[in-house]
């Protein structure tokens, strides 16, 4: 059996290759270059060149053939262009999920098979099992601090049938130990951060390659807004009814609040000993304008850093963005009402079942554990399949449910069953 290891230059893929070689498989390594530009990267240089150098040294140390492939064109078309489009729409994409679906286990897999590979192996911390009928199961990694199954949530059965995850049963310290004992060049290399194959970036600068920067208002929303908001009060009432909700009520519950009703009137006043005329906002019980930003599309729900807003006792978070009016809304404190929601929706054509044999049908209700971002602890929830999509109703309100991010659901035994981008 011939196996191609996607060798990135990091310790995880290095140990994956080493273990397969020790197990007697016919192994070769392939390094993929997916990015050329340096604009927006914090280091301002081509990190991939260093990564390739380390990967080649690792392959030489292990004693396996090494190949290089440039997939930058496919990466830009399938991942980066998708990112720009999503941000322009006010959604927050996950490029790592798309990279695995569109690049590592598609374009890269095709290239590996042209070189004779039967399987592609990666350094993901997750586990795979194959049932007697050939159905593939993908489960959380053994290391609870490094489980990376979330990033594989869009893979198909065909893709999984060609995938191997040699370190899924190991914990990170053990992987480091194996690498050091084998004297691998990547043994003490730090884990990569940032966008998959692009690196650590200043996101606004990166996005400004295609998205225009336009100044707008930052509006702080006060608690009084929620006490007067009919939808907020209606949603609270709907939540008391559990899952006994109509399709229309679920759609309403999954729809986030809008804040365009918070408007400001100005007044003139005289200031200082020279009584200079100035303009200010009249007091509004629902909110106030507290700053300026460079483009609502550059911000995401739950964002705390990069706002440049002080003078608050507790941290300030983005609770909503209005792309059409170019306004971002913020709230003070991690339990601000605008940060918390209990229901989300996935559109019918975007529901992805890793296990098609377990797919829900309209009218089905099931209990699963769900996460809405990488490394979030799994949350208890009820999934309700309706004609209008899949609704996820959480037992406890969730912070920062973000359109464009992926909601992923798991069985009690840790098997990842399906996923979909959050629509609302």
Image (cartoon, rainbow, N blue to C red):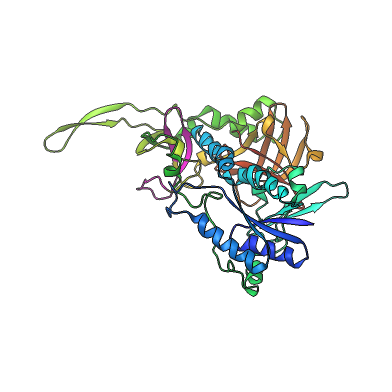
| Residue 144 against residue 307 in the figure, above or below | below
Classify residue 348 by image quadrant: top right
130 horizontally vs 143: left or right: right
Q: Residue furthest right?
A: 132
Q: Residue at x 80, y 40 (%)?
A: 358
**Residue in the picture at 65% in, 74% down:** 181
- Which of the 4 quarters of the picture holds residue 355? top right
Q: Position of residue 294 (x, y in %)?
A: 38, 38
The residue shown at (21%, 30%) is: 269
Q: Residue 331's x, y, as percent?
A: 45, 41
Which residue is painted at 75% across and 49% down in the image?
162
Instruction: Please identify the quadrant where the N terminus is shown.
Output: bottom right
Give the residue at the far left of this rendering. 274
Camera-side residue of 303 and 356:
356
The furthest residue to the top: 248
- The image position of residue 317, as x and y in percent, is 46, 44
Horizontal and vertical percent position of residue 136:
79, 48
Residue span colored magenta? 306-330
Count the numbered circles shown.
0
Say which of 3 and 123 sits in front: 3
For residue 372, say whether it is visible.
no
Compared to residue 84, the image places residue 165 above or below, namely: below
Using the image as rendered, state which of residue 52 and residue 261 is in the foreground. 52
Q: Which part of the image, by quadrant, shows the C terminus? A: top right
Q: Is residue 309 magenta?
A: yes
């Amino acid at each position: 059996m011939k196996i191609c290891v996607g060798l990135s230059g990091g310790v995880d893929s290095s140990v994956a290759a080493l273990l397969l070689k020790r197990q007697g498989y016919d192994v070769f390594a392939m390094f993929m270059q997916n990015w050329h530009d340096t604009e927006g990267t914090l280091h301002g240089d081509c990190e991939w060149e260093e990564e390739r150098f380390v990967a080649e040294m690792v392959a030489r140390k292990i004693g396996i053939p090494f190949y290089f492939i440039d997939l930058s064109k496919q990466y830009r078309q399938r991942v980066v262009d998708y990112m720009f489009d999503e941000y322009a729409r006010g959604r927050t994409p996950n490029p790592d999920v798309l990279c695995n679906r569109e690049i590592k286990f598609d374009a890269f897999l095709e290239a590996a098979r042209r070189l004779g590979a039967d399987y592609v192996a990666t350094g993901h911390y997750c586990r795979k099992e194959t049932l007697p009928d050939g159905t593939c199961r993908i489960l959380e990694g053994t290391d609870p601090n490094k489980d990376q199954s979330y990033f594989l949530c869009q893979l198909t059965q065909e893709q999984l049938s060609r995938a191997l995850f040699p370190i899924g049963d190991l914990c990170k310290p053990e992987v480091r130990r194996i690498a050091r004992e084998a004297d691998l060049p990547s043994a003490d290399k730090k884990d990569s951060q940032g966008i998959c194959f692009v690196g650590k970036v200043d996101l606004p600068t990166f996005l400004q390659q295609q998205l225009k920067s336009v100044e707008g208002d930052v509006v702080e929303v006060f608690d009084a807004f929620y006490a007067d908001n009919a939808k907020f009060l209606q949603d609270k009432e709907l939540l008391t009814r559990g899952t006994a909700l109509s399709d229309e009520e679920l759609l309403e519950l999954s729809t986030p609040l809008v804040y365009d009703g918070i408007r400001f009137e100005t007044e003139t006043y005289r200031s200082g000993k020279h009584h200079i005329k100035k303009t200010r906002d009249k007091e509004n019980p629902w909110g106030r304008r507290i700053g300026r930003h460079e483009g609502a599309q550059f911000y995401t729900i739950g964002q705390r850093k990069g706002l440049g807003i002080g003078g608050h006792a507790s941290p300030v978070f983005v609770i909503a963005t209005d792309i059409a009016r170019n306004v971002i809304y913020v709230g003070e404190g991690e339990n601000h009402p605008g940060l918390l929601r209990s229901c989300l929706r996935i559109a019918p054509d975007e529901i992805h079942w890793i296990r098609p044999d377990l797919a829900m049908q309209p009218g089905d209700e099931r209990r699963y554990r769900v996460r809405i971002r990488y490394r979030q602890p799994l949350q208890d929830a009820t999934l309700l399949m309706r004609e209008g999509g899949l609704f996820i109703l959480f037992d406890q309100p969730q912070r920062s449910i973000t359109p464009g991010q992926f909601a992923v659901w798991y069985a009690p035994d840790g098997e990842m069953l399906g996923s979909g981008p959050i629509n609302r």
